[in-house]
Amino acid sequence: MKRNWWKFIAALLLIYTVIGGFLFDAPRLNILNETIRALHFHVPMWFGMIILLTVSVIYSIKYLSSSDSKNDMIAVSFANVGMVLGVLGILTGMIWAQFTWGEWWSGDPKQNAAAIGLLIYAAYFVLRGSLEDPQQKARISAVYNIFAFAALIPLLFVLPRLTDSLHPGNGGNPGFNAYDLDSNLRLVFYPAVIGWTLMGVWITSLLIRISAIAEKRNTY
Amino acid sequence: MLKALIQKEILLEWRQKAAFNGILLYLISTIFVCYLSFGLKSNVISPISWNALFWIIILFAAVNSVTKSFIGQSVGRQLYYYTIASPQHIIIAKVIYNTVMLVILALVGFGCYSLVMGSPVTNIGLFLIDVFMAAVGFSITLTMVSGISSKANNSTTLMAILSFPIILPMLMMVIKISKNAIDGLEWSSSSNELLTLGAINLIVGAVTYVLFPYLWRN
């Protein structure tokens, strides 16, 4: 019970996010209108994805330096849940884009970068699937995980800043800071980031336990 | 050691001329297929399509030619190299060799392509620098991915799906620079893109240098 306190916090924060995100006062702005509430779902999911994928890469590096198969298991589980958050992030982003930009997919640099990022991680799972020897699978997928992450950083953080984009925070469009003059949004946004990330970690910890059990059953 | 390894790559290539000629023919046939599929006379295609098509052809030729840098090798021979050379030397030698090969491929491709499709490029100097930087980037990424996918069963499919998403940011920069070269913009307007492309190459190169020994150790 004592060790699970953070799970209660995650659940409470997400309940608060859903209620607050939909019901609290939001600034009235042209074009954006009520879609500004996507901020509490779309943006924290991307934050959560980046955090989980970073943890995954850290465990991949740990695996390469220690060759402990537990690290590999943790890295895969984090990548898995990070990918789920990424898909949710791109779907919520598309819903938002439909109602503000008028199109589900409008070829915005950030949308394209997100799609490429998902392709990279999909390739990671295909690579794992096509290697049979467990040690080789762990080592080679760890190498690809680090390699892909290094290639992803310029994609997500550098390239969108070089091109014009309609995405908030780019190309002269106001970012998050310009909206919340009354800081009502912040009141929900920061708990949402923590809530979604904790939820991701929770799911990951379950995945890790499941694969640990599966591995034990295979060895006996 | 490095020099010997590069020499060995070139010598091997020279002894199996059929493989290199095959890639050249692959490139030229692809260009001809595109030319006939568009059904055009010279200079009718719009510069934007010209640009995109050229780089797609080069990308596919590059994937096909670099694939064999690890996939074709027998296990015994790899073991032999492992005993006589350090992995860092091996990857650097392969990357340098592949870069040279890709530059040759891209230049031959550019020649044939402009012969049949016409060439809208006005700033040749910028275009050639772009070709060189693209060759470096493609060669690093594809050599590394070839090393990764050679360990798996369905390595040719893996080669494409692992490398395309990683190459895409590079390709976007390369296409942008070459568009600037086509429009004949002055050098300063491409400096941002050139710098970014160089930075991406540097990141990918550094990561490859650090990671390859783990891949090699088997």
Image (cartoon, helix red, strand yellow):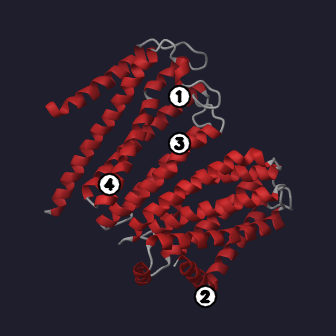
Secondary structure state at the residue bearing disc 2: helix
Q: Is residue B213 visible?
A: yes
Residue under the point 51% across and 58% down: B206
For residue B84, side relative to residue B117 (left or right): left
Q: Position of residue A160 (x, y in %)?
A: 59, 39
Q: Could you confirm whether marks 1 and 3 are on the same chain?
A: yes
Against B139, is A21 above or below? above
Question: Residue A96 got which mark?
Answer: 1
- Alpha-carbon span between mark 1 and mark 2: 59 Å
- Alpha-carbon span between mark 1 and mark 3: 19 Å
Question: Looking at the image, is mark 4 or mark 2 nearer the viewer?
Answer: 4
- Alpha-carbon span between mark 4 and mark 3: 24 Å
- Give whichever of discs 1 and 4 has the lower sequence position: 4
Residue under the point 31% across and 22% down: A15
**Neighbour tally class for label 2: few under 14, some 14-19, many 20 plus, Cα within 10 Å:** few
Question: Residue A62 got which mark?
Answer: 4
Q: Position of residue A34 (x, y in %)?
A: 51, 18
For residue A68, side relative to residue B152 (left or right): left
Q: Amino acid at mark 3?
A: Leu
**Neighbour tally class for label 3: few under 14, some 14-19, many 20 plus, Cα within 10 Å:** some
Residue assigned mark 3: A156
- Alpha-carbon span between mark 4 and mark 2: 42 Å
Residue assigned mark 2: B15
Chain to which mark 4 belongs: A
Question: Looking at the image, is mark 1 or mark 2 nearer the viewer?
Answer: 2
Q: Position of residue A161 (x, y in %)?
A: 61, 38
Q: Could you confirm whether marks 4 and 3 are on the same chain?
A: yes
Q: Amino acid at mark 1?
A: Trp
Query: Are the residues at dot 1 and dot 3 in contact (C-beta closer than 8 Å)?
Result: no
Query: Are the residues at dot 1 and dot 2 in contact (C-beta closer than 8 Å)?
Result: no
